[in-house]
Every structure is written in C-alpha cells, then in structure tokens.
Amino acid sequence: MKSRTRAAWLFLSPTLLFYAVFLIFPVLSSLYLSFHEWNMLTPPLQAPNVGLANYRYIFSEDPVFKKALLNTFIYVVVTVPVSITLSVLLALMLSRKRRTGFYRLAFFLPTITPQIAVGMVWRYLYRPNYGLINTGLNAVGISSINWLNDPSTALLSIMITAVWAMIGTNLLVVDAGLKDIPDEYYEAASIDGAHGWQRFWHVTFPLLKPSLLFVFVTGTIAAWQVFDFIVAMTAPTLGKAGGPVNSTMTMVLYMYQTAFEYLKMGRASAMAYVLFIIVMVISLVQLRLFRRGGIESYY
C-alpha cells in the first residue's frame, strides 16, 4: 500500500470508526432485534428468534400501531404542505418590503426554541378555562373548546402548533432561494406582458424548486419522527402521552413506549424499520417528482 493511501486511511479512520460505532452498528443491531424477542433483561444474543412474528403482530394484532400510523400520516400530510405554503407566501410578502429583519427574527425564534418548551407554552394557551385561545374565542361569543382533552380536536391542536413552529426554518430557506433569482428574469417577464401570477408560476416557482425540494424532504422526514410536541402537550409523563384514547399517538412515541415502557425491543425495532422504509420511499418519490420540469439543471 502506498504511503499516501495509508495516510488517507489514517486520517479517515476516526470518522469511519465514529460511523461504524454510532450508525452502522445500531442500524444492524436494530435489524437483528426486529427478528427476535428481547426484553432488555437478558443478553441480546440469547434472545429467541421469532422470524417475522414482530412484523405480523404490529400489522395484524396491534390496533394502537395502526392508530399511530394513521395519526402520523395525517400529521405529515397536513403540517408539511401547510407550513411550506405559508412560508412561501410570507417569503414573497417580505421580499417586497424593506427592513424585514424584525419579521424574519420573529418567525425564526420558534425554530431555535426547544420543542418541549414550545409544546408546554402552547399547552397553557390551549387550557379549557384560562387559556389565551379560549379567552379570545369567548370574547367574540364562541364557546370554549377542550382542545387537547377532546379526541376530535387533540391532533388538530398539535398540528397547529407544529405548523407555527415549522414556518421559521422553511421561511429561511425559501427566502434565501428567492434572493438567488436574478431580477433580469422578472424584467423579461414584465416586458413579455406577464402579470403577477404568471411571473410566479413561470419564473419564481421553477427557480425556487431546489429550495422547495429541500424543505419538502427535510420537513417530511422530521414530521414522520414527531415526538417532543406530543409528549409536551398531551401528558406530564411519557407513559401517558399520546392521549386522549390514542388520538395523538404517533409512530415514534409508540415505538418509545413499546421499547422502554413495555420492554418489547424486538417489536419496537420492527416498528423502526417500518418507519425507515416509509420515509425512504416517500423521500425517493419526492425527489422523483421535483426533478421533473427542469430541476436537473441544478444538479
């Protein structure tokens, strides 16, 4: 082996060791456990092999998992498109104004605030008797809503909070994408007689696709892994989170409870791989869809 090659492997070895210990080993261990029944009280290698029993159980015999899967799907389908649409509208409004630093800071603050803290604040805002939201509704003659304690409104309440918290990051990315669009394109479109919507559809939207692709993919991955908001807003303790009657149960929260509350690590590992496959397929579909219409020129 040449000295330069040995030197390259020597410099790469800390990074490779880090990935091997903290990424590759946990991923392969989780795959191994998903085919075994392990309760964390015995060595993992002594856990009995159950084949596909864990996968069959969560899809055919576990109603909570199906509920968690449906809740997470609704959460992703609602929060990601709504937050990105609002971010684009706000970015377009801010691009037409001067001295927008205060507004950008105001929208970005929820992003740098821990989600647990955001969820606890919104939990007090949603309180049935003294919450600020119900106080405002009462002021205009609308009866109080039991936001987080009613199964029909609990998930909606969390999605409203999540959209509010997601706008900051999306706005930052979309705003940067808008600034990269040369003014010459808009001037040429105006000379051709294009009005506001035509300039957005034929100039802004195609050139904004790389930014939209980024926020769609990263936002979707983060939404499928929602955990902190649910815990902070639905229960003071992890064991009671996801209520009422599992109306806010999500896949990651149920995975956590299955692993560390019920000590079913094999079943939780099977859920983790189901979630991994779902996120991977959706991400590939998003990449495929966004590459249509000229986005290839950006890669």
Image (tube, helix red, strand yellow):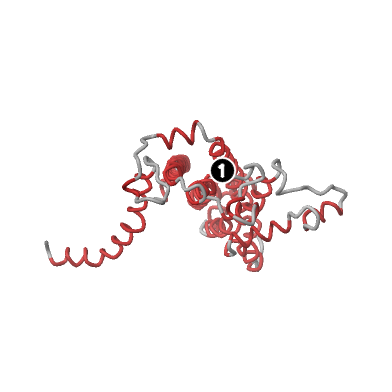
- Mark 1 lies on a secondary structure that is helix
Which quadrant would the N terminus be assigned to in this image?
bottom left
* Outermost front residue: 41
Quadrant housing residue 3 = bottom left
Question: Quick check: 270 left or right of 246?
Answer: left
Q: In the image, is residue 225 above or below residue 36?
A: below
Measured from the top left, where is residue 148 in percent x and y? 70, 49
Which residue is at 76% across, 48% downward?
146
Q: Is residue 59 visible?
A: yes
- Frontmost residue, 194 versus 59: 59
Expressed as whole percent of the image width and height from the top left, the position of residue 15 reads: 31, 63
Residue 101 percent location from the top left of the image: 63, 68
Classify residue 197 by image quadrant.
top right
185, 117: nearer the viewer: 117
Question: Circle 1: is it few (<14), some (14-19), or many (20+) Cα within 10 Å?
Answer: many
Please give the name of the residue rendered at 69% of the width and 42% of the height, measured from the top-left corner. Answer: 151
Q: Amino acid at mark 1?
A: Thr
- Residue 98: x and y in percent read 65, 66
Q: Nearer the viewer, residue 73 or 206?
A: 73
Please name the residue that numbered disc 1 is placed on: 72
